């Protein structure tokens, strides 16, 4: 598959046909090297959504109202995210489009961690979000240098120089609201 096909496939499968941001256009042809350098896997598959897979859960978890409410809330919040990658720590990275389903170009970066919590990133681009996650580890400097080498600008030395985006309804707050609503509903049955 040539580079244009990869970008087109990524746009269709991960971004609902929207324009692929510049940093991802640069990273997609280097996706195997990205995975090798820092364990971040850019997903091309159209049916990729492991964050909503509940097949491995025990029946006791599936019958617990708190767990059910959490899974339902997490699944609903994830519908407002355009996840594009996962990492070896079990986190998913993407764009927080929010309930208005704004365009990816105007969306902040979001991480769904291995505990099922949503976090906005201070990073302005996907590449910066990857780099932000590597800060404090020995791979940070090499990864930043590699990004610059392949043409991705990085204008900061540490994530403390970045500012968290303002969101009227961040994914974490929406998850909490939905969790409480679903929990009340389940407990009243």
Image: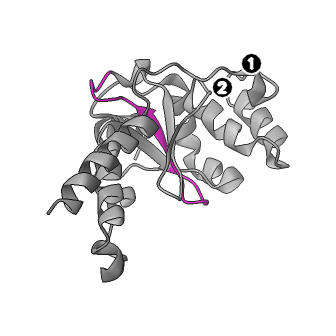
- In this view of the protein, can residue 161 be seen by the observer? yes
- Spatial distance from mark 2 to mark 1, Cα to Cα? 10 Å
- In this view of the protein, can residue 48 be seen by the observer? no
Q: Main secondary structure of the magenta part?
A: loop
**Residue 29 pos. (x, y %):** 53, 41
**Residue 184 pos. (x, y %):** 25, 53
Number of marks in the rendered image: 2
Residue 152's disc number:
2
Magenta region, residue range: 86-102
Question: Please, is residue 83 above or below residue 160 in the view?
Answer: below
Q: Residue furthest left?
A: 189
Quadrant where the image shows the C terminus: bottom left
Colour basis: one colour
Residue placed under numbered mark 1 in the picture: 155
Task: Look at 35% across and 51% down and name the residue there.
Answer: 74
Task: Look at 48% across and 26% down and name the residue there.
Answer: 108
Task: Look at 44% across and 30% down and name the residue there.
Answer: 170
Q: Nearer the viewer, residue 107 or 69?
A: 69
**Residue 147 pos. (x, y %):** 70, 33
Q: Residue furthest front?
A: 188
């Amino acid at each position: 598959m040539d580079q244009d096909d990869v970008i087109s496939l990524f746009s269709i499968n991960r971004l609902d046909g929207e324009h692929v941001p510049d940093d991802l256009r640069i990273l997609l042809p280097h996706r195997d090297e990205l995975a090798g350098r820092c364990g971040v896997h850019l997903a091309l598959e159209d049916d990729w959504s492991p964050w909503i897979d509940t097949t491995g859960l025990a029946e006791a978890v599936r019958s617990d109202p708190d767990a059910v409410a959490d899974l339902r809330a997490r699944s609903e919040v994830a519908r407002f995210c355009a996840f594009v990658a996962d990492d070896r720590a079990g986190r998913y990275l993407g764009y927080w489009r929010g309930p208005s389903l704004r365009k990816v170009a105007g969306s902040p970066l979001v991480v769904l961690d291995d505990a099922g919590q949503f976090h906005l990133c201070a990073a302005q681009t996907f590449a910066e979000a990857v780099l932000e996650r590597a800060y404090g580890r020995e791979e940070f400097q090499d990864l930043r240098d590699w990004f610059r080498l392949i043409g991705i600008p990085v204008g900061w030395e540490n994530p403390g120089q970045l500012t968290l985006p303002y969101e009227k309804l961040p994914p974490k707050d929406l998850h909490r609201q939905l969790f409480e609503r679903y929990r009340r509903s389940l407990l009243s049955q």
